[in-house]
Amino acid sequence: MVNLRPTSPTDPVLTRRHLLTAGLAAGLAAGVTAGAPGLAHASPYDPGTSLDVGSAATPDGIHAAGDPDFHPVKFRLPAPTGRKALGTTTLHLIDRSRPDPSMPSGQRELMISLWYPAEMSRSPYATYMPARTAVAVDDVWTGEYGLALPPGSFDFGNTVTHARVDARMQRLPHPVVLFSPGYQYSRFVNTAQVEDLASRGYVVVTMDHPHETPVEYPGGRFLPGLVSDEPPQPSDIRAAVETRTADARFVLDQLERIADGQNVDAEGKELPEGVAEGLELRRTGMFGFALGGYTAANTMLADERVLAGADLDGTLQDDRLRGPLGDVAEHGLDRPFLLFGSGETQRTEPGKDFYDKSWATFWQAQQGGKLNLALTNTKQKAFTDFQFIFSQLFHEIYGTDPIITSVMKALVGSAKPARSVLAQREYLGAFFDQTLRHRPEPLLRGDSARYPEVRFVR
């Protein structure tokens, strides 16, 4: 353990900069390496993750209290690229077909958010996360990879999105896209992608998965996410995918009820005007990050209502190195599916770097349309809001210090966050425009000089 405490009255007072620099240096020295099997303490685990940072030297009992550099950081989400104004609303759903003794109802309870094209509104902008969820995510992220960030660094509860709370939905039929997050991740951690799809005319439905992801219910009731020092076993992942798939199918059922004019909220909350008329469920897709991508594919295998899907850097097996393969990897799908990997994961060519048998097997079995894209110079978490949030945090702390480049490369790769976000938005939007709206997209035909960050693997 590196001793960061002052050793004499003449030693300088430790500042947040000292602690963070020591934490970053220790984390980097411990080895942020591709393909390593270990995990940082308290770091959310995802099958196929390529990051392993050992325990950093984090001094017990030392905080940045009184440090003038310390303040909670609010974040600026990238502006959506579409033309639509945005609205968002949350719903509390109870699946009365699945028992859950830990819930007040005795049945499985979900929280979902709808993000949608909205009419102009003066209602307040939605915050990035509800209060309890914001604290829980901050608790995890301040310990991410031993970076020695003081608790409260991430001010998610006061960061605002581009969507107005409960704004009236634009009175047009909109294709619907479901979203499932990574293992143990909140449904809010991919808000930049979700908002952008909504700004292009989609209703995007995000969902948490209770007992795995953190969930905040009406009235302040909070269910923490799964936190474990040990990575999950393949059987745990298979169970999680099956549970998530059942969640997604239940949500599809509830969307059908909403479109029929029924009130499905557990507390009887009225939906914003226009939602029932605005759901074009004949054009439904799904995407997810990491385990959420596996979930999207598995949901399509189980439910023909989902017409197109996308997997953002998630293996399609229960453990990327040990297997077994998921059913969807072995059988493929008869509808279009996008594989979108980072620069160091999920390749389909045997003997090449980052080969993933599940993607290769799926590629051979897939009967519907298929694309395999690579976002070069990135790591897995570049497919979440992680990249621009940490970039803003470190710039707030360090200004233009060169250490920012080093640590961002270690965490998410060397791609510029703004370019990475833009490339993901453009290709994801083009994919759903082509598959759900039947609009031919030249961007999907091959490598583009406009987006050199994206490479067509097949």
Image: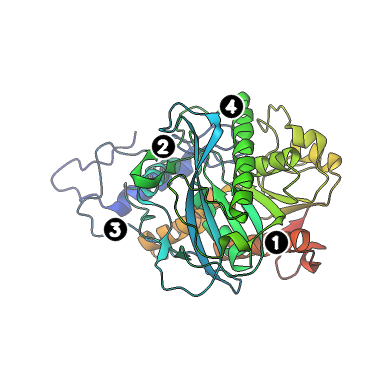
Looking at the rendered structure, the kind of residue marked 4 is Asp
Q: Are marks 4 and 1 in contact (CB under 8 Å)?
A: no
Q: Secondary structure at mark 3?
A: loop
User: On the image, numbered disc 4 is attached to which residue?
Assistant: 236
Q: Secondary structure at mark 4?
A: helix
Q: Quadrant of residue 145?
A: top left
In this rendering, position of residue 365 left or right of residue 401: right
In this rendering, position of residue 63 left or right of residue 441: left
The CA distance from mark 1 to mark 2 is: 33 Å
The CA distance from mark 2 to mark 3 is: 25 Å
- Please identify, in this view, whether the residue under mark 2 or under mark 3 is nearer the observer: 2
- Please identify, in this view, whether the residue under mark 1 or under mark 2 is nearer the observer: 2
Sooner in the amino-acid sequence: mark 1 or mark 2: 2
The CA distance from mark 4 to mark 1 is: 32 Å
Sooner in the amino-acid sequence: mark 4 or mark 1: 4
Looking at the rendered structure, the kind of residue marked 1 is Tyr
The CA distance from mark 1 to mark 3 is: 36 Å
Looking at the rendered structure, the kind of residue marked 2 is Pro
User: On the image, numbered disc 3 is attached to which residue?
Assistant: 71
Mark number, residue 224: 2
Q: Are marks 1 and 2 in contact (CB under 8 Å)?
A: no
Q: Quadrant of residue 172?
A: bottom right
Q: Position of residue 22 (x, y in %)?
A: 36, 46
User: On the image, numbered disc 1 is attached to which residue?
Assistant: 427
Sooner in the amino-acid sequence: mark 2 or mark 3: 3
